[in-house]
């Protein structure tokens, strides 16, 4: 019997004070933070996509990311983000 584990990332944006945003990416299986970005003022979709791209590249020796789970904030409801997921064959939970 073969057992396959999905490689799942959980992403979240936390607003800190008035002008700062923390974008955090967690590996759900390992239960640790695998990447983040801390931005003053304008966090945008391109920053999120760049951060996710870098995480995927840095962790290429691990199983392929299959699912990304988010809180469905507006950052995660736009074409550049969906295009990134489609290009990388990643499903949304």
Image (cartoon, helix red, strand yellow):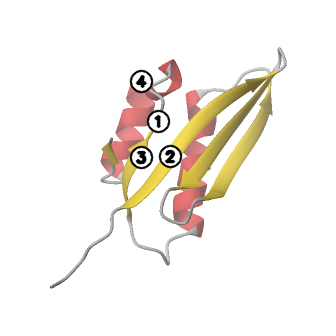
Query: Looking at the rendering, in which quadrant would you find the C terminus?
Result: top left
Q: Which mark is residue 10?
A: 2
Dot 2 or dot 4: first in sequence order is 2
Dot 3 or dot 4: first in sequence order is 3
Q: Which residue is mark 3?
A: 68
SS class, disc 4: loop
CB of mark 2 within 8 Å of CB of mark 4?
Answer: no
Q: Which residue is mark 1?
A: 70
Residue in the foreground of this view, choosing between 79 and 9: 9
Dot 2 or dot 3: first in sequence order is 2
Q: Please name which of the two marks, 3 or 4, marks the residue nearer to the observer.
A: 3
**Image height check: is 23 above or below 55?**
above
CB of mark 2 within 8 Å of CB of mark 3?
Answer: yes
CB of mark 1 within 8 Å of CB of mark 2?
Answer: yes
Residue at (33%, 51%) from the top-left corner?
A: 90
Query: Looking at the rendering, in which quadrant would you find the N terminus?
Result: bottom left
């Amino acid at each position: 019997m073969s057992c396959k584990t999905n490689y799942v990332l959980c992403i979240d944006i936390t607003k800190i004070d008035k002008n700062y945003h923390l974008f955090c990416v967690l590996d759900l299986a390992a239960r640790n933070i695998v990447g983040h970005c801390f931005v003053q003022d304008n966090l945008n979709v391109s920053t999120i996509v760049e951060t996710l791209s870098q995480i995927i590249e840095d962790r290429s020796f691990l199983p392929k990311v299959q699912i990304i789970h988010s809180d469905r904030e507006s950052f995660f409801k736009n074409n550049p983000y969906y295009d990134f997921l489609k290009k990388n064959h990643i499903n949304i939970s």
